[in-house]
Amino acid sequence: MVKLFKSTKPALKKLTAEDISVEISDLSVYFGKKSVLRDISMVIPKHRITSFIGQSGCGKTTLISSMNRMNDLNKNHRCTGSITIDGQNIHSKKINVAKLRTQVGMVFQAPNPFPMSIYDNVAFGLRLQKQIPRRQLDEAVERALKNAVLWDEVKDQLFASASILSGGQQQRLMIARALALKPKILLLDEPTSALDPLATLHIEELMQTLKKNTTIVMITHNMQQAARLSDYTAFFHQGELVEYADSDKLFTQPKHKQTEDYITGRYG
Amino acid sequence: MIMSMSWFKRFCAVNIPLVATALLTLSLLSILLLVISKGMTHFSVKPIYQVSHSSFASPVLGMVQNYGAKETDIFWFDPIAKELQSSRMALSEQQITLHQQTFVIKTRTGKLLFAQGLMLDDAPFSKEAWQRLLDENNAFTKQIEQLNSKIYPLELRFAQYSERNIPLSAPVFARLQAELETLHEQKRHLQKKQQQNRTVIQFSDGATADFPVSKIALIWQPNAMSFGEKMWFSMGEFWRFITSDHQAVSGSAGIFPALFGTVLMVFLMTVFVMPIGVLTAIYLHEYAPDNHFVSGIRVIIINLAGIPSIVYGVFGLGLFIMGLGTQIDQIFYAQNLPSPTFGTPGILWASITMALLTLPTVIVATEEGLQQVPQTLRNGALALGATKYEAIRFNVLPMASPNILTGAILSIARAASEVAPLLLVGAVIYAPTLPVDDIFPYLHLERQFMHLGVLIFDSVFHSANTFDSQSMMFAICLLLIIVVLSLNVLAAILRAKLRRRYERYS
Ligand SMILES: Nc1ncnc2c1ncn2[C@@H]1O[C@H](COP(=O)(O)OP(=O)(O)OP(=O)(O)O)[C@@H](O)[C@H]1O
Ligand SMILES: [Mg+2]
């Protein structure tokens, strides 16, 4: 599948401003005294899938949380550098953080369904935005659930509590919840870690479809997935960006020894 | 010996919690049982004995308590004074007899009369005849009330005319006066006819007396009742007890105003304390910075719960009534001064004082609930573009609601059972009016109110000499327990429902 798009994929260095969705420059993040990310500079290409890989605890989640400013919720959090999304610095005073988060959707590493029905979970974000007629809301919820490959399993119990779903179903519900808002950028933290191969395949297909008009950043510990699905891959090690390149290149001819060790499974 | 010691030690080690629990349950049960059994006797049908004794000129009718003890208490009806008296004397078996034909008559003012015989319109008493007389009497009362509802507006207009100095000779005025006169004439006629329905009561000394039907509330023959009739009568008594008015002159009247006052005060207290308590807890837990000042405030709040309740009463009296109430009077009710409107104890100040007293409970319980809501849930809402307020409103508060209800239950239980502070800020032994009536604005928050706890307090210290004051005290206790318990059960059911809904998420 990747092959299909390969011909149209420019090298990272040659991206024009138009093709850049997120630009991170010199970003350093600290939690209290602890430095978690150091001098990260990278661009996330628009309407592509970018994978973040790296050892557990190397700061992947922290980095994607910086993009929708979820890190701000931590009182010890401090950061330097800048993140620019569609030409706007997201740390600027003019930014409405709640609005930013509707445009930069995020699916957390662990599913966190709200204590309400499946329907209400998916409709939550939409209802916060504006008054939507019931019919339209129904349609939006259905579409989001279908996209997240959950519709067939829950269509008969939309108004049952979300807690009755299995772990994998909950993970897809979280994806549906984020999709309902039709974000410009979608941040997925290990979206298929709890899914069986078939559901994983469905989600991967969904990401391929979504990327026509959505920028996707995905964290994964599955090298094959990163290789076959993503256009670009970034490898992090202990809070630093070690290597960032076209997925094909990174997985076939890694430039750094650390990268090679990691993807060949010599540690991590 | 050593064997038994080690056995005892082992028993204690294993069973002390069990024994403690059992003792606690036992003492709780015995309190409940005492209150229930003593309280129920208030509604039971007590037999009326004929008692002969040298201190009575002729045999008297009376209720007997502690018969068989060295001294027997009797509550006897004095046919000359037409009143119940209580005496304590030694009685032997020969001095007490039980006659089937004995009547107890309860007047509309709550007084009791014990009679040997009863004639209704020159015929001996029968239930059917009595029912007929009662129906007739009620019909008269109704007609008179209808007339009254015509007379009062006319009289009001009459008064308005005289105020404006319209000469008496004016034709409108004359017509009005004539109209009023005919209405009054009709009323007098009806009243006279109502008075004609009479009963003749024969007392134990043989003397008889005329008694109008309109003054009688209830007649029963305790000695001739079957078990079923007694049960039915007791239920009726209980119903009258909780629904009818309190008469300061008689101990055996209903306590509806006190029941109403208690429930209304608790309700108002809840209305005041819940929003303030929950909002304070939300502020402290979600918004306040994490510094020494805030933790200091938290410590103070927790310790506020330990202040003796009477101190709150004094505080309410000083701040609300003498301070705030007096100010309100000067600004809004200046025309009524020097008689105060809000500058005097009343149900508003009582419920606010109680709200203050129970505020720490609500805050602590709510904060506990907020603490239990996982951070990931808040993050989930925020990541979907919710503001902090929206995340709290739609996610955090619903999940904390079982704890918030626990706070409500605890505060209701506390507020319903406190008496001391209420005596200072608005509860009275007798209030002529309810705080709610059909006069605008319907809810009169400045009025004083009656309270079950205060009535108990009062019956212990003041009216210990009437024959049923003790059983009445227990009956009120029983009612207080029922009120608190049913409020608690209501809240507990609600809480269990909410718990079931949210337990899978935390
Ligand atoms: N709220 C926090 N407070 C303090 N330290 C934190 C916090 N969140 C993360 N960290 C630290 O930051 C580092 C990076 O964490 P992060 O969650 O970004 O790792 P990760 O790459 O996502 O790991 P994983 O693959 O296991 O999810 C870790 O060392 C972690 O201990
Ligand atoms: Mg992570």
Image (cartoon, coloured by chain):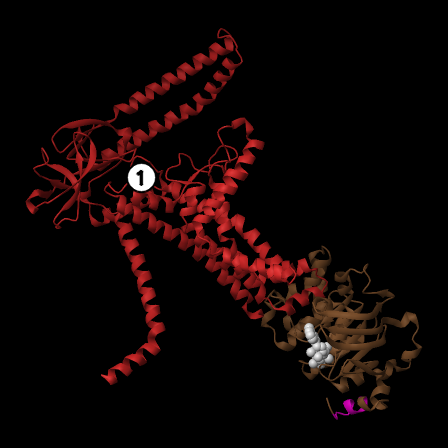
Q: Compare residues B28 and A186 and report the one nearer the observer.
A: B28
Q: Is residue B127 left or right of residue B405?
A: left
Q: Residue furthest left?
A: B94
Q: Residues within 10 Å of mark 1 (few under 14, many from 20)?
A: many
Q: Which residue shows up at 58% across the image and 59% down it?
A: B296
Give the labeled residue for mark 1: B253
Image quadrant where residue B433 sits:
top left
Secondary structure under tag 1 reads loop
* Total tally of numbered discs in the picture: 1
Residue B6 included in the magenta stretch of the image: no
Q: Name the foreground residue: B133 vs B100.
A: B100
Viewer-proximal residue, B275 or A156?
Answer: B275
Q: Is residue A150 visible?
A: no
Q: Is residue A262 magenta?
A: yes
Q: Give the image location of residue B268, x and y in percent.
A: 50, 46
Amino acid type, label 1: Ala
Tell me the colour chain B is drawn in: red
Q: Which residues are magenta?
A: A259-266
